[in-house]
Image (cartoon, helix red, strand yellow):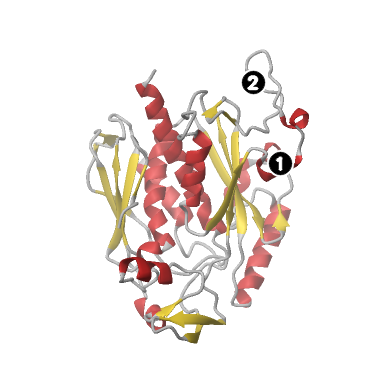
Amino acid sequence: MAGNSFGKIFKLTTFGESHGVAIGGIIDGCPPGLQLDLDAIQNELNRRKPGQSEIVTQRKEPDTVEFLSGIFEGQTTGTPIGFVIKNTNQKSKDYSHIKDVYRPSHADYTYDKKYGVRDYRGGGRSSARETASRVVAGAIAKQFLSSIQIHAYTSSVGDLFLEKPYQDLDFSKIETNPVRCPDDAIAEQMIAKIKDIRKEGNTIGGTITCVLQNVPVGLGEPVFDKLHADLGKAMLSINAVKGFEYGSGFCGAKMKGTEHNDLFNADGTTQTNLSGGIQGGISNGMDIYFRVAFKPVATVIQKQDALDSSGNIVEMQGKGRHDPCVVPRAIPIVEAMAALVLADFYLLNKMYN
């Protein structure tokens, strides 16, 4: 299986399956001498871990990271950083009923047809549990990029939207509620919506908005390695993501050029920021902001038709512990992938300057 690595200089390779002994990763290219706050890394994992509130999956995993290499006396050594996160609360029997059944909108069918074998226990490698390894690497990248602020938050659940622009939000309120929406009134509505969906045995999607502030001018390459292109790839590599837009996004397609152009100030900043902090694929020093769309979780606790490995249409019902809405737990994943992209481009930029 190819495609388990991300990045060119600050590079992460992940391994492991949802119901295996452990998941983990190797970070290559992290500069030496970076003093790490290990508690901060664990806190990022705690934001992603299951069982943290009543609106997420109730799988109980401590998600404690154990570093194996690349760190000495709290500092990075410049050698590969190896780490593992042990799986402790697998319930593989919850998946025995789909051993020979392909669940709708899951990776079951495509994995089996591509590789001729699949781990049906929680989806194996295709499980979103793999993203815990990304959060570890992203937490280290955040500390490397200490001057850059990265804030992601839930901006919609189903048809409930946070209409306020990010400039009017207090990012310190993101972690004050389980849905991670920095507006108390909308957050309460989102939480109620997710609870109702769970009672139905159903799931619902939503969006995450992410804001990157104090990004230096000059990150990104102008042709195939545009900064927004790599951010898009990073976000679209996250499980359940169906869309990515930055700056004015799809709304910009409705505008005239005279409405959309960001006019300059004398210091090189712009009066508006419909470009989303990126022009010509290169950061321009303004805030970078983007939105990521997540589909409803594919496993629903309702009966649905499915396909079995013999080509029969059969009736199946989802079992086990699943998120009714993946968005609240995906916040630290979005932040982590953004940090990995920025760290990679920052180091690449240093090579040429």
Q: Is residue 345 left or right of residue 286?
A: left
Q: Is residue 42 visible?
A: no
x 46%, y 63%: residue: 50
- Which quadrant does the N terminus fall into? bottom left
Q: Residue at x 56, y 45 (%)?
A: 152
Alpha carbon of mark 2 to alpha carbon of mark 1: how far?
23 Å
Q: Give percent across and percent down for residue 233.
A: 48, 45
Quick check: 65 left or right of 266? left
**Can residue 142 be seen from the camera position used here?**
yes
Q: Residue furthest top?
A: 266
Residue at image location 56% in from the left, 67% down from the top = 54
Residue sitting at x 61%, y 53%:
207
- Identify the mark at residue 167; answer none if there is no mark: none
Left or right of 164, for residue 191: left
- Quick one: 96 or 151, which is closer to the camera? 96
Which tag is nearer the camera, tag 2 or tag 1?
Answer: 1
Q: Which residue is mark 1?
A: 253
In the rendered image, residue 307, in percent from the top left (x then y), is placed at: 47, 80
Dot 2 crowding, Cα within 10 Å, few <14, some 14–19, many 20+ = some
Mark 1, other Cα within 10 Å: few <14 / some 14–19 / many ≥20: few
Q: Quadrant of residue 347?
A: top left
Label whose residue precedes the other's in the sequence (2 or 1): 1
Secondary structure at numbered mark 1: helix
Describe residue 190's horizontal placement relative to residue 301 as left or right.
right
Please provide percent x and percent y for residue 133: 36, 52
The residue type indicated by label 1 comes to: Ala
In front of the other: 163 or 195: 163
Which residue, given by chain and number where applicable, does mark 2 sit on?
269
For the C terminus, the quadrant is: top left
